């Protein structure tokens, strides 16, 4: 995938897979201060690719993401808000691990931001 | 070695020069200390989220010098009580910002609604998060208080921790 490559920072990775009309990204590690700028930039690229390829859905697999700080969370807020206000919004699905309890609290807040766009699955 | 009081389960105070690359290690150490006393993983998760956001705050906003981080877990009637406190020097702009944010939090009737509103507002701001303290109240379910003494800022997060499931 030339448009979107794997992101590797200190203790944090994003690994994309593009399949038909869906982009899947596996997030792993801990989204802390080191990851904030790379994640924000990465999500911009995700949106550009999604628009360019007319994707119907982007899946974010958080099952290996142990934590995300409020600044990385903010990057998702900006992305989701961008998608919500796009001419042709695509769906955003979060895959979660129920044993990582912070995910339920944080992702519910993201879902409330854009209930027509965001879904959460265990 | 000082013995813990009758109700205390954890009491740790750290004085250190804040570094971003130590936050994860500090959070993990706190997890190890508290896990034997907090049987509910969701409750422990709230505590660690609060600790992480407070620790990042002092890394990002400390105006230099050593900082202090304190965590106590105390047994009270009906469960446990957690108290996390940070103390650091901060510049005047930061003090004004914290004062405004915490006043807004204190005035909000509902922490979740206030958090949702802050999230919506933050979407249009490309720089900074400003969500950390609101996240502590909404997701961490902790009550925040602060004190400013000269250029010294103390933030305290306090809340009940359920220990249902513990024999």
Image: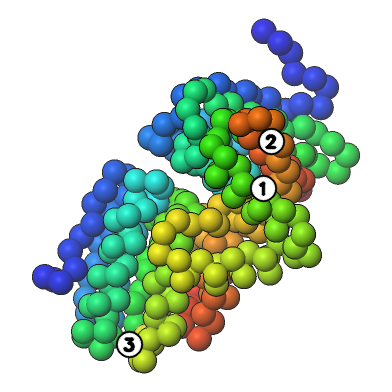
Residue contact at pointers 2 and 1, CB within 8 angstroms: yes
> Percent from the top left, x then y, of residue B29?
51, 30
Task: State the residue at coordinates (88%, 39%).
Answer: B77
Relative horizontal placement of residue B86, taking residue B72 as reference (left or right) = left
**Rendered view: B113 above or below B140:** below
Residue B128, position as x, y percentages in the image: 45, 56
Q: Residue furthest right?
A: B77
Q: Chain of mark 1?
A: B
Foreground: disc 3 or disc 2: 2
Work out whether B87 lies above or below B133: above
The local crowd at label 2, few if under 14, some if 14 to 19, many if 20 or more residues have their Cα within 10 Å, is some
Residue at 28%, 59% in the rendered image: A14
Quarter of the picture containing the N terminus of chain B is: top right
Residue A121 versus residue A8 in the image, above or below: below
- Would residue A77 be visible to someone looking at this image? no
Residue drawn at x 34%, y 77% is A58
Q: In terms of secondary structure, where does tag 2 sit?
A: strand
Residue carrying label 1 = B99
* Measured Cα–Cα span from mark 1 to mark 3: 43 Å
Asked which secondary structure carries label 1, the reply is helix
Q: Chain of mark 2?
A: B
Pointer 3 and pointer 2 on the same chain: no
Q: Earlier in the sequence, mark 2 or mark 1?
A: 1
According to the image, label 2 marks what residue?
B148
In this view, the residue in front, A13 or B35, is A13
Most foreground residue, A66 or B134: B134
Q: Is residue B24 left or right of residue B48?
A: left
The residue where tag 3 is placed is A56
């Amino acid at each position: 995938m030339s448009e979107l490559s794997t992101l590797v920072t200190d203790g944090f990775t994003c690994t994309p897979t593009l399949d038909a009309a869906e982009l899947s990204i596996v997030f792993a590690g801990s989204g802390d201060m080191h990851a904030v700028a790379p994640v924000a930039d990465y999500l911009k690229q995700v949106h550009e690719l999604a628009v360019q390829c007319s994707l119907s859905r982007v899946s974010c697999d958080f099952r290996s993401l142990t934590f995300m700080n409020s600044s990385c969370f903010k990057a998702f807020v900006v992305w989701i808000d961008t998608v919500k206000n796009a001419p042709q919004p695509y769906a955003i699905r979060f895959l979660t691990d129920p044993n990582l309890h912070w995910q339920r609290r944080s992702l519910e807040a993201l879902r409330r931001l854009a209930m027509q766009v965001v879904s959460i699955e265990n | 070695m000082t013995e813990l009081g009758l109700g205390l389960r954890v009491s740790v105070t750290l004085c250190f020069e804040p570094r971003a690359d130590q936050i994860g290690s500090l959070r993990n150490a706190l997890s190890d200390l508290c896990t034997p006393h907090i049987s509910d993983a969701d409750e422990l998760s709230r505590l660690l989220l609060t600790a992480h956001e407070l620790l990042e705050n002092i890394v990002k906003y400390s105006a230099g010098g050593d900082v202090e981080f304190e965590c106590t877990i105390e047994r009270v009637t009906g469960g446990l009580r957690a108290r996390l406190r940070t103390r650091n020097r901060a510049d005047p702009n930061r003090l004004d910002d914290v004062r405004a944010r915490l006043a807004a939090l204190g005035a909000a009737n509902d922490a979740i609604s206030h958090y949702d509103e802050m999230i919506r507002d933050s979407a249009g701001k490309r720089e900074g998060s400003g969500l950390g303290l609101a996240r502590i109240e909404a997701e961490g379910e902790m009550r925040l208080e602060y004190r400013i003494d000269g250029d010294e800022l103390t933030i305290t997060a306090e809340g009940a921790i359920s220990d249902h499931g513990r024999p």
